[in-house]
Image: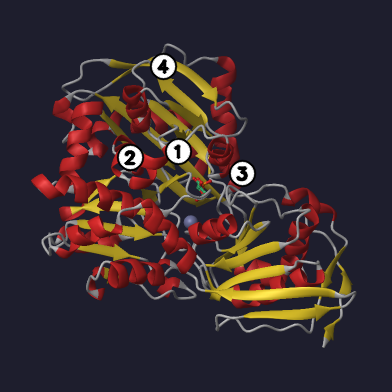
Amino acid sequence: MVYKIQQVETTSYSDQKPGTSGLRKQVKYLTSKINYVENFIQSIYNAIDDKSVIVCGGDGRFYSDAVIDKVVKISAANGIEKLIIGKNGILSTPAVSSIIREKKASGGIILTASHNPGGPDGDFGIKFNGKNGGPATEIFEESKSIKSYSICKDLEVKIDQIESKTFEIENNKKFTVEIIDSIETYLNLMKEIFDFNKIKTFLSKGDFNILIDSLNGVMGPYTEKVFVDEFGLDKKCLRNYKPLPDFGGLHPDPNLTYAKGLLDEMKTGVYDFGAAFDGDGDRNMILGKDGFFVTPSDSLAVIGANLKLIPYFKKTGVHGFARSMPTAPAIDQVAKKLGLKCFEVPTGWKFFGNLMDEKLISLCGEESFGTGSDHIREKDGLWTVLCWLSILAEKGTNDRASVSEIVNEHWKIYGRNFFTRYDYENCETKGCDLLMEHLNNYVQNKSLENKLFPTNITDLSQCYVVEKVDNFEYLDCGIRIIFKDGSRIILRLSGTGSTNATLRLYIDRYTKNEFLYTEETSKVLETLVKIALDLAKVETFTGMKEPTVIT
Ligand code: G6P
Ligand code: ZN
């Protein structure tokens, strides 16, 4: 049968601007707008020249099947030669990035709203990654002027069997759909990077228990493959490992608030290592025995300091590091010691890609629970866990190092960067915009410079002195209040929400005072938090007395 291509007239939407990470909307919104998804997919194809191979898959959230069907039909009509889809539409974001690179594809369409809740009342998202496997940005302009899309309406494919099928499209074109194993390519890459035998031997001794929580997102099958099939562990080491369209009602964001179930289990003292992932598997949270929390900023620094223990980096060498601006600069201390460069970029993984392509960095990370390296062009949750297990396996062979011991040792060498983030979710956009405007006034009038704020922490009889207040290099990336001792207060508006505004307040403070290392973060940062809330008038502008999430 030869499939006909239809041109369908459509009206453009002005709100398809991808946020920090792709287009994200409420399912209800997407489904209420005619051709909303079709427009965006067509805009992707209007924006790219190379139409040979496209990869498609996602975290399997509600509405994925309908969107995959649209991707298939629109790809066929747009002259895509081959569309590679993960079985049942399942591919983690790191897996898509690895497949694009491995198959030398022209790009990939990732169907996920990452850590945002799913289900009929949740969010959906579409993200396009380019040839290097990383997020691409050029779709918005196309989406504003789109007038029609092309579609092969009658073309249907089944995505539950691993197989390849070729279809005849009018004008003598051929269109192949290849359904692939969701895990294989990614797993092979992990095996090249890490010493699987070493980790397996370490874990199979039986005196180091781990618990891995996929929060009912895409990582379930990946963790089963790695920890059960490869490392031979009992399935009991996995939590919430069945991908569910609504994540079983969980908010698939690996932090102390939304992965509380894991935290509570860790607090029982049974497990030595715990980790959680977000819906699409690029974020991670690392915990030690009794719920010892490793901040993402520290996790990045610890991995950076130990990178040479990992076979991949022994081979490639370590080029340099990078972090996003609000991330506490713990990795900067490691870079200094190792004589490496450390770059500071705006929030969003896309900003690391060029640095990797230019071989300027090998490792990077963000406070928002993302760590990754140049093995792909996305952050990678499972990769991070395997880094930690490699470090633990290496250090634990002789002296049974634990997560907290490794982190404490790290602080002794490099100092400690205390970090906290307050999120004020679902605020009125207007109030948040006014708050940022109010802060911008401090940037303009310089009235805060050299201002003193007394600290009320008894063992530090000093003042915080404002060094400068600025809008981070790239406009609208966040207002920074930087103190002379290096402490920082940062405020920015989130770019990943689907409705209203989320204000994020980041606080970090560096110390080499060993007596403070074991103090509670909330206590050490108490004064800075108060200064920030007062200066930014958070309650006045948001109407919220308390943040919704603290990480
Ligand atoms: C996504 C991106 C990250 C980014 C995060 C920030 O997860 O992949 O690179 O750090 O969003 O989101 P925000 O809501 O703070 O804009
Ligand atoms: Zn994610």
Q: Between tags 2 and 4, which lies in front?
A: 2
Residue type at tag 4: Val
Left or right of residue 383, residue 460 in this image: left
Q: Quadrant of residue 410?
A: top left
Q: Between tags 2 and 3, which lies in front?
A: 2
Frontmost residue, 352 versus 249: 352
Task: Evaluate if marks 1 and 2 touch, with contact meaning CB atoms under 8 Å apart.
Answer: yes
| Residue reaching furthest to the top | 450
Residue type at tag 2: Leu
Secondary element type, mark 2: helix
Disc marking residue 466? 4
Task: Evaluate if marks 2 and 3 touch, with contact meaning CB atoms under 8 Å apart.
Answer: no
Q: Between tags 3 and 1, which lies in front?
A: 1
The residue carrying mark 2 is 307
Q: CA distance from mark 1 to mark 2?
A: 10 Å
Q: Quadrant of residue 411?
A: top left
Q: Quadrant of residue 39?
A: bottom right
Residue at left offset 55%, top offset 80%: 162
Left or right of residue 85, residue 81 in this image: right
Q: Between tags 3 and 4, which lies in front?
A: 4
Sequence-first disc among 2 and 4: 2
Answer above or below: position of 543 versus 414: below
Disc marking residue 430? 3
Residue type at tag 3: Lys
